[in-house]
Amino acid sequence: MLKELLMNQASHDEILAFLEDKHAYDIVQMLSELDSEQQTVIFDLLEPEKLAEVLSYLEPEEAAGIINELEPSEQKEIVEELEPDDAADIINELPEESRTELISALDKDEDVLELLGYDENVAGAYMTNDFIAVEAIEDVKSATKNLIKKAGDVESIQTIFVVDHEHHYLGQVSLKALIKAKYPLTMSDIMIIEPTFNDHADVDDLVKHMKYYGGYDIAIVDDQNVLVGMITMDDILDIYQDEAVEDFEKFTALPDTDFEENVFKSSLQRLPWLLILLVLSIPIALVTSNFEELLASVVILALFQPLILDSGGDVASQTLAVTLIALTNKDSNATSNGIKEIISGTLSGLVMGLLAFFVTAIFGYVLAIDHIWLVATVVGASLWLTVILAPTLAFIIPTILNKLKFDPAVASGPFITTLIDILSIFIYFGFATILLGGITHV
Amino acid sequence: MFDFTLSTAKLKNELAKLHESDIATLFEENEKEQVKIYQALSVKRFADVFFMLNEDTQKEFYESLNIDQKKSLLKSLEIDDLKTFIEIFKLKEHASIISLLPKSTQVQVKRLLAYDENTAGSISSPHFISLSIDTSVKEATSFVTTESTDKDEIDVIFFYDESDAYVGAISLQKLIMTRANQLLKNVVNEDYPYVFEDEPVTKTVKKIRDYDIDIIPVLNPNHQMIGIITADDALTAMEEIHIDTIGEMVKVHEIDEDDSPLQRTFKRLPWLLISAILNLVIASFLSIFSQTLEANVAIVLFQPMILGMAGNIGTQSISVTILGLHQEKIEPMKHFWKEVAIGLINSAIAGLVAMGIVFIFLWILPKDYNHITELSLTVGISLAIAMFISAFSGVLLPFILRKMGADEKAASGPLISTINDFTALGTYFFVATLILMSI
């Protein structure tokens, strides 16, 4: 629609009127349909306040690109209109020079300055320091009056934080609780104490925290428990989403998925993983090469190899998934969970091993193969052992990684299953050599 | 360690210091003290804790209560939470639980239960405030502060017109800042986003995230509001979708940590056995290639490579497609052709690299192999073909499943991967027969 307006040479006033009550997100969608010239026209047209809003809905890199094109005085204006956390994200994406210039141009008490110092993985980098805090002794009536006065300056008054003289976190009150409270109650009477989070703590731990405690506007405090910022629900949803997608990608050996990327770039991004996995299958070939005589005389072993490998992979993936989820839950007992997985593997393996044993025997009978029972035993026993080994590794490896403070999701499915493949081939051909070795022809 | 020997009053004090989630953990870990905790908490507080418990604990505890206690507990739950609770039980037990509810609640719960799973309606809550657009600012503020119940969400107030159709919304924040002499008509945001009751949950979650809102209204086909979904609900939904997606891939549904090993085995064995049986069936079909295998045992060396790589690229394709579908970020046709192109490129490159690696490998090994070149060629070509087929079907399947109304995540399950294996190995042995048996 915006596109049509521009094509039909609509006047600036008409365009502005059209954009007036559109949500910033919708405006961003409409902008993506325009070419860069048209986009520049729109950006020049918008008032700083509206422009700031629109920029906050773009990816920080894109927004930084646009801001970089503006005059320094305009840049300052925009930053002042932006929410501090959005401003911090965008400023951090600016090229070095522009960044320093802009920062020195800002007023000394500008909220965003405090946020720029944080590392990108910590809670501080995600928080906004634009919030409302009242002292515990204040009564609800005067607090509400104060609130209404400040309401225009702050983005969200959904949650009002309660602090002491020195700005230490004491509790929080939701807007709806405040509105309904009757005088002469004080803020400390109606406040709820919610768990807080440290500004330098890892944002991954925040996800764990939220899964356990549920979602709410969370107070971010420093080491002295002084309230320094908050992370609101909408940011929490975004954080969770990014984390979930990242976990999923690691689990399936995908790189950072960008749906906008062109074909060649996407191919090139996935290729390293594929090639690494390709190279990893060489050790498997190496192990197998030691058993060639055996294979030549008992070809049926080759046909059942996929069964052993696939089952190992299936069970390993299951345990891996369960372990990863347990490791990201606060109230999980990952160890007891792991042990249960291994025992379950033992039980499943027994059933599957027996099944494989009998089917192999029938198979061997029908194809008139020699030493049916030995072959069947090899297949059945290997399957059983593999299905015990698989969950053991799939549990131990991510758990160790986690203990060493690495992200356990790095131990993704394909890597663990390749490792298990190598070991299960040893088992398979090992058994075969022991039981059938005597009968191979050279 | 928590001291349960305290008097009820003292216990209540101690518990008041804890977060509901922590009380819930305490509850689950101390079965014998559950009644004590129940008695020490107020009805409202207990309802909050109850909802944090895992499903088995909820069920068991509920069943241990007498009729009056049951009624009181049910009454304290919010209606969407009530619906979630009832769904824990088997269908035939629903009626008896519903009969314990007050009449008006019964109607609302039944309505929620009637929605299809995964629709916006099914996770909506009727605890919202909606007023006529002609209401004055004063009336609206007064209604919100004095007449709304504890369960109602008042952070966003919704409005309807004469025909009851949804018009727009205003945040509580904005409402209290609005001067009494202004008309709500002029202040209300008519562009406030909404979803329809039978739109998928993924779409709802995406809208909440895209527009950064805390509450989204749910409308029926007549544009009338029938419920709301909060950002908190969205977070819960996101967690479930995430676990479901991974769960489908590995065929572990309802990941419940309290399951004993035996229970886990029972739940997973069916699929594992089906997988194993399919594998055995494949093995029997592939036995027609026995001659080729006997004559060229070296082929077996690279069997895992073929299977593994076909599997890996297939997983990548399927996962990217599922991710895209969930995030509603892709256009089917464009995505399809893009993935096919990626599959083609990567399969070809992998095939070439494999050819080289296999050649070097066989050459370096102290053992003497015949026909190294032909073998490398076989592996390279089969790998490329097998990988491409796998990548191709990996993109196609989720779309087909979605079209058929089935869950697209099932594309990642063992059935499909076993069929992939069949195709991959079949290709391998076939190409091997062509190249190596004709020498």
Image (tube, rainbow, N blue to C red):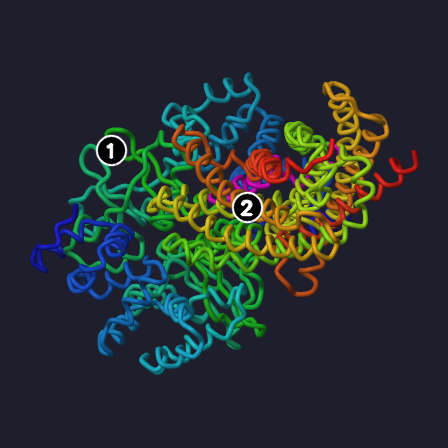
The magenta-colored residue range is: A240-264
Instruction: Give the residue pinned by disc 2.
Output: A381
The amino acid marked with disc number 2 is Ala
The residue at 55%/46% (across/down) is A381
Frontmost residue, A421 versus A352: A352
Quadrant location of the C terminus of chain A? top right
Q: Are marks 2 and 1 in contact (CB under 8 Å)?
A: no
Q: Which mark is residue A225?
A: 1
Judged from this view, the residue extending furthest toward the right is: B438
The residue at 65%/44% (across/down) is B315
Frontmost residue, B90 versus B114: B90
Disc with the residue nearer the chain's start (2 vs 1):
1
Relative placement, left or right, of A301 versus B60 is: right
Quadrant of res A40 = top right
Asked if residue A54 shows in the view, the reply is: no
Magenta span includes A263? yes
Between the C-alphas of marks 2 and 1, the distance is 59 Å
Image: B119 above or below B231 = below
